[in-house]
Image (cartoon, rainbow, N blue to C red):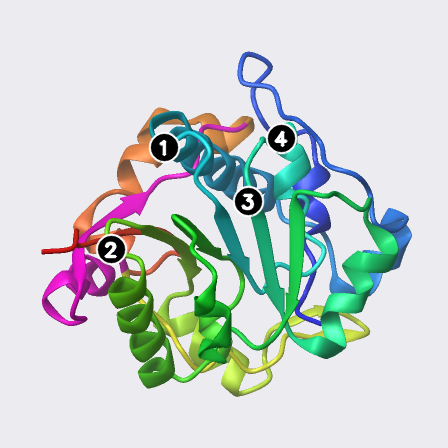
């Protein structure tokens, strides 16, 4: 299973924003082998939550598909929205959320690889892919996005990416997060500039937007730092969240 994100439970958001916690799948001590939690995790989770919430506000009742969801608790953090929620993950992984997370009638768990196009038989409007694409070959990622765009005109895809320098470190086995855990190889990187060019690279992609995580505490709330991470000379060297909008049917 991909590295979990225990840091999503850290109290790292501002008091005026708040955070809705999801169910806890396992005691936090279980995650110690993955190293110290990053305060970026709860901010990324909040950015994902905000993006989904905004979409559902303008497209009420439209289904959501979460690719490679693992033990993520997005559905509960959103307050159990009244939508059909499809969770797509590998057969050897999908049993874990079935055993460890609450069972919900709204959630349909599909035991397939994200690259297995059979899941496209469902009809989602918003697709999320957190912690997934960096593990897949770039050509497979682009082909999958093109197929999603063709199948779901007007839909949206939200996913995260790592910068090239971090990808290279993982390929050399140099990202040691604890004494017991070394991050697995992540062959596919994508910069912000590369993501913004996707409408001209992948058929059916109408637009791309860099999603900035909300302010947190300490340095994460610093307005100067937040302005710097948007600067063209730096943004291509940081992790990123991308929201793609698929072209409407002609």
Instruction: State the residue position of label 1.
Output: 59
- The residue that appears at 73% across and 54% down in the rendered structure is 36
Q: Residue 121: which numbered mark, if any?
A: none
* Residue 118: percent from left, percent from top: 49, 76
Residue placed furthest toward the top: 16
Mark 4 vs mark 1, foreground winner is: 1
Kindly indicate the quadrant of the structure image that contains residue 24.
top right
Is label 2 in contact with label 4 (beta carbons under 8 Å)?
no
Give the quarter of the figure containing the C terminus: bottom left
Instruction: State the residue position of label 4.
Output: 12
Q: Is mark 1 on a helix, strand or loop?
A: loop
Observer-nearest of 185 and 51:
51
* Residue 31: percent from left, percent from top: 81, 58
Instruction: State the residue position of label 2.
Output: 153
Question: Seen in the image, is 147 located left or right of residue 106?
Answer: left
Question: Seen in the image, is 74 located left or right of residue 208?
Answer: right
Tell which circle, 4 or 1, labels the residue nearer the N-terminal end: 4
Q: How far apart are marks 2 and 4 (CA)?
A: 36 Å
Above or below, comparing residue 236 to residue 225 in the picture: below
Q: How crowded is mark 3: few (under 14 residues within 10 Å), some or many (20 or more)?
A: some
Observer-nearest of 243 and 126:
126
Q: Residue 40: which numbered mark, if any?
A: 3
Kindly indicate the quadrant of the structure image that contains residue 54.
top left
213 in magenta: yes
Above or below, comparing residue 18 to residue 21 in the picture: above
* Residue 139: percent from left, percent from top: 31, 84
């Amino acid at each position: 299973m991909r590295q979990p994100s225990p840091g999503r439970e850290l109290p790292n958001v501002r008091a005026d924003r708040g955070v809705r916690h999801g169910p806890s799948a396992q005691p936090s001590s279980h995650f110690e082998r993955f190293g110290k939690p990053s305060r970026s995790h709860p901010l990324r989770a909040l950015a994902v939550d905000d993006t989904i919430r905004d979409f559902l506000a303008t497209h009420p009742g439209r289904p959501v598909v979460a690719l490679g969801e693992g033990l993520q608790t997005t559905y509960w953090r959103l307050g159990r929205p009244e939508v059909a929620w499809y969770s797509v993950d590998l057969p050897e992984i999908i049993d874990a959320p079935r055993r460890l997370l609450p069972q919900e009638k709204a959630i349909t768990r599909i035991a397939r690889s994200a690259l297995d196009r059979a899941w496209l038989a469902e009809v989602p409007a918003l697709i999320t892919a957190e912690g997934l694409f960096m593990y897949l070959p770039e050509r497979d990622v682009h082909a999958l996005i093109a197929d999603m765009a063709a199948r779901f005109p007007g839909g949206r895809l939200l996913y995260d990416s790592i910068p090239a320098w971090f990808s290279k470190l993982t390929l050399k086995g140099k990202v040691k997060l604890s004494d017991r855990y070394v991050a697995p190889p992540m062959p596919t990187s994508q910069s912000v500039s590369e993501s913004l060019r996707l409408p001209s690279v992948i058929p059916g992609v109408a637009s791309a937007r860099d999603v900035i995580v909300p302010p947190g505490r300490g340095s994460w709330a610093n307005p100067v730092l937040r302005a710097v991470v948007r600067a063209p000379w730096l943004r291509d060297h940081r992790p990123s969240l991308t929201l793609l909008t698929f072209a409407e049917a002609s």
